[in-house]
Image (tube, helix red, strand yellow):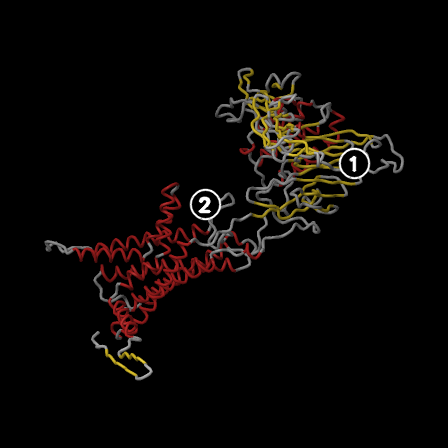
């Protein structure tokens, strides 16, 4: 069947068409899709298939489509440069050349800065030469003409000095705005002067709307400046926020435009009748980029409850509920009420000593009411969660100017199960929802089969090596035992430390915190104290940090004893000494075990804190911390200076020792005409065995860190195979090949083969009449 809808919208006006193929079910007295399915929808025709007859129809539904990068969430959430229900209406000024200056494409109400910059050796070198504002015209958005041009020798200090004179305030305001257009380059002193300039301009009477717009743009820009702990700067911010609160409540009285919006700040003002309203709601709707846009700032001057339309996402909502009887109680009065709201993108103007904010973004919302005290104050904030994090806790606070910090007095918090922070207060001022987050760690899985098999074989090899060399040492007479004491001590120490490392690694490297549920917690909605920090780090429970310290120590000890073994080998071979110095045993023991213990203790003492253990170790698995918050390698973490650096130096030292030993053992007498292949093979085995014992395969790990792609994969596999089987390699090269071990194995095999061998064999044949027996004997030589 084919159906042609009466109105085919296609994709016009952001609408697309979906349909379903149905038949009328008389038993249900409604449409049913049983036994029907739909085909294509092309050229205005809807294709349907059914496996029965009946009364059929194609039910159509209009689907909403978002254009130009808009996100569909029941409604379209548009980027800054587009507006309308389907993000199809232009909300920007096209790039344009004005007065010989080039300005880029800019959203409505924003300022565009010229691509031309001030020349070098001027006070404003590198800053734009001019600015203009994109505004909505009668037909389409357009830039304001003429553009404001900056005098490149002008500084913020010059502007501040000229504010009290008879200078043109519009020129000064535009110049201050251009000079702060690159906030990341501003010094703390320049930020302070810019705040003072904006404060002066916004508190001045009888200034034009363009001056206010430029001053608010300056405020928006310095909100992006790097915060610093400067008393003079804090004082300037203190005065500026008070001025902004006064401006918000009076803006609708002194200006035809009661809304001033820039990317980091939004100001809204209104005059309402106390007798005609139940409540006022200020809403800042989200966009795709998170910046504020005038079209997404809404003010409802008569609502009985806080509501957000379905599908819309709000960054912040503020609701003021007024007494039902107005200012006079039971009788409504016609008196007007002035309300003003200021929404800050972050808390850079509110420097707290109680709340340490590192990475979270905390929006601040100010409400000021003149003429009537609100009965109820309700707020909602939507935190900007970082990637791989989740909300941990929050607190509802206001800025106490007397304390110069956040205070929770008169505020309490509500539910936040859906990620929206709900706050209630009994007064008006500058409010915020301080929140903390926790990292969502992807805990390491159990080791793969290759690693487990390799490490298990290494354990067996090391155990056999230790047992053999201990028993073999007791079998030797006192002279031989004394002569081999240092080499046996070094080899046994290597095996003991490597065995301890592997056992600790297998049993404890995987962090078990996710199994115990220690990180699972519900938001505390009862307690509303000011949070200490924006990042929640669980206090250390102990086992994982202990495992990290043990792994660090045993691996360092393994490499240190490797070096001691190679050093004494060089002393004996290169110097042709029969014996080592008498103090060598004590010296090697002190260095082999003492230096790793010192390095481990220093690393632990510098980086470990009980309340912040992740400065020392990782959370995903029990090993030294290596990455910063952005998951990039950090040279300041203990993984580098506590492990990679000392191990790297040891490996370089071991490589030098290996070269020296190989030169001596592989040196050929020039008088010989030929060299036996067996002799060459033995020399190669000596060098290869020493390379294995010295752990030179760990150099592959450094190559893994600096490679990518296929080479990274190949080196990772080789590194895993070589390091996990190092104990097995030591057993094969230093134990299995020795004559004493082979003789011992041969004796064990002979003993096993001689057990339960019957030398005499009997067979019986029992009959009713008689019994017959035979005996046979095996020759012992068999």
What secondary structure is found at the residue carrying circle 1? loop
Q: Residue 633 carries which label?
A: 2
Residue 25 percent coordinates (x, y): 68, 34
Q: Is mark 2 on a helix, strand or loop?
A: loop
Quadrant occupied by the C terminus: bottom left
Camera-nearest residue between 532 and 55? 55
Q: Which mark is residue 486?
A: none
Task: Report x, y in % for residue 118.
Answer: 51, 23
Q: In which quarter of the image is residue 576?
A: bottom left
Q: Are marks 2 and 1 in contact (CB under 8 Å)?
A: no
Q: Callout 2 environment at 10 Å: few (<14), some (14 to 19), or many (20+)?
A: some
Provide the residue designation for mark 1. Answer: 304
On the picture, is 397 further left or further right than 153? right
Count of numbered circles in the view? 2
Counting from the top left corner in percent of width and height, residue 277 is at 81, 32
144 horizontally vs 631: left or right: right
Looking at marks 2 and 1 on the same chain, the residue that comes earlier in the sequence is marked by: 1
Residue drawn at x 48%, y 26% is 121
Figure check: 462 above or below 79: below
The residue that appears at 53% across and 16% down in the rendered structure is 100
The residue drawn where x is 55% and y is 18% is 96
């Amino acid at each position: 069947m084919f159906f042609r809808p009466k109105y085919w919208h296609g994709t016009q006006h952001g609408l697309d068409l979906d349909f379903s193929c149905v038949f009328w079910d008389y038993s249900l007295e409604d449409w049913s899709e049983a036994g029907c399915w739909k085909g294509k929808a092309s050229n205005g025709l809807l294709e349907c298939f059914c496996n029965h007859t009946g009364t059929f129809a194609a039910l159509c539904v209009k689907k909403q489509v978002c254009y130009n990068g808009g996100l569909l969430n029941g409604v379209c959430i548009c980027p800054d440069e587009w507006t309308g229900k389907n993000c199809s209406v232009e909300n920007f000024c096209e790039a344009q050349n004005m007065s010989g200056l080039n300005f880029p494409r800019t959203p409505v109400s924003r300022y565009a800065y010229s691509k031309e910059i001030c020349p070098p050796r001027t006070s404003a070198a590198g800053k734009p030469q001019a600015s203009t504002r994109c505004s909505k015209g009668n037909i389409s958005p357009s830039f304001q003409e003429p553009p404001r041009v900056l005098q490149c020798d002008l500084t913020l200090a010059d502007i501040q000095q000229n504010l009290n004179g008879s200078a043109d305030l519009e020129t000064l305001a535009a110049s201050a705005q251009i000079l702060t257009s690159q906030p990341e380059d501003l010094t703390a002193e320049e930020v302070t002067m810019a705040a003072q300039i904006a404060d002066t301009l916004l508190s001045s009477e009888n200034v034009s709307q363009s001056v206010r717009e430029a001053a608010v743009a300056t405020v928006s820009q310095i909100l992006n400046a790097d915060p610093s702990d400067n008393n003079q700067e804090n004082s300037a911010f203190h005065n500026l926020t008070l001025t902004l609160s006064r401006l918000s409540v009076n803006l609708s009285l002194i200006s035809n435009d009661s809304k001033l919006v820039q990317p980091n700040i939004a100001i809204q003002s209104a005059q309402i009748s106390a007798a005609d309203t139940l409540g006022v709601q200020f809403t800042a709707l989200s966009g795709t980029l998170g910046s504020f846009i005038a079209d997404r700032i809404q003010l409802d001057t008569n609502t009985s409850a806080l509501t957000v339309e379905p599908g819309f996402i709000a960054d912040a909502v503020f609701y003021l509920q007024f007494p039902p009887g107005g200012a006079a109680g039971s009788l409504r009065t016609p008196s007007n009420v002035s309300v003003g709201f200021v929404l800050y993108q972050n808390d850079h103007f509110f420097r707290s000593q109680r709340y340490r904010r590192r990475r979270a973004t905390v929006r601040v919302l100010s409400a000021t009411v003149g003429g009537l005290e609100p009965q109820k104050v309700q707020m909602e904030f939507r935190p900007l969660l970082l990637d791989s994090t989740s909300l941990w806790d929050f607190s509802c606070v206001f800025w106490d100017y007397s304390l110069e910090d956040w205070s929770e007095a008169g505020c309490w918090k509500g539910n936040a199960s859906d990620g929206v922070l709900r706050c209630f207060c009994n007064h008006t001022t500058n409010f915020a929802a301080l929140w903390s987050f926790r990292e969502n760690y992807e805990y390491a899985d159990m080791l793969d089969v290759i690693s487990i098999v390799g490490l298990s074989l290494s354990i067996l090899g090391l155990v056999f090596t230790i047992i053999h060399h201990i028993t073999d040492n007791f079998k030797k007479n006192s002279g031989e035992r004394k002569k081999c004491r240092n080499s046996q001590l070094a080899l046994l120490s290597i095996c003991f430390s490597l065995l301890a490392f592997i056992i600790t690694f297998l049993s404890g490297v995987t962090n078990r915190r996710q199994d115990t549920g220690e990180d699972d917690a519900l938001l505390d909605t009862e307690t509303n104290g000011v949070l200490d920090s924006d990042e929640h780090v669980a206090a250390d429970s102990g086992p994982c940090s202990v495992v990290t310290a043990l792994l660090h120590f045993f691996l360092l000890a393994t490499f240190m004893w490797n070096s001691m073994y190679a050093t004494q080998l060089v002393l004996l071979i290169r110097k042709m000494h029969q014996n080592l110095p008498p103090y060598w045993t004590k010296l090697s023991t002190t260095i082999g075990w003492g230096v790793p213990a010192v390095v481990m203790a220093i690393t632990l003492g510098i980086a470990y804190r009980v309340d912040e253990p992740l400065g020392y170790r990782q959370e995903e698995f029990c090993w030294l911390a290596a990455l910063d918050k952005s998951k990039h390698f950090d040279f300041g973490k203990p993984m580098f200076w506590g492990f990679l650096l000392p191990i790297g130096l040891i490996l370089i030292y071991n490589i030098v020792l290996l070269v020296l030993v190989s030169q001596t053992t592989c040196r050929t007498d020039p008088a010989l005409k030929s060299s036996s292949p067996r002799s060459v093979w033995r020399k190669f085995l000596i060098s290869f065995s020493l390379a294995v014992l010295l752990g030179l395969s760990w150099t592959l790990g450094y190559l893994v860190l600096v490679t990518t792609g296929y080479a990274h994969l190949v080196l990772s596999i080789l590194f895993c195979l070589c390091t996990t089987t190092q104990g097995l390699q030591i057993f094969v090269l230093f134990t299995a090949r020795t004559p004493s071990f082979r003789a011992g194995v041969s004796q064990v095999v002979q003993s096993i083969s001689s057990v339960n061998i019957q030398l005499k064999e009997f067979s019986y044949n029992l009959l009713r009449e008689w019994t017959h027996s035979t005996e046979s004997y095996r020759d012992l030589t068999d």
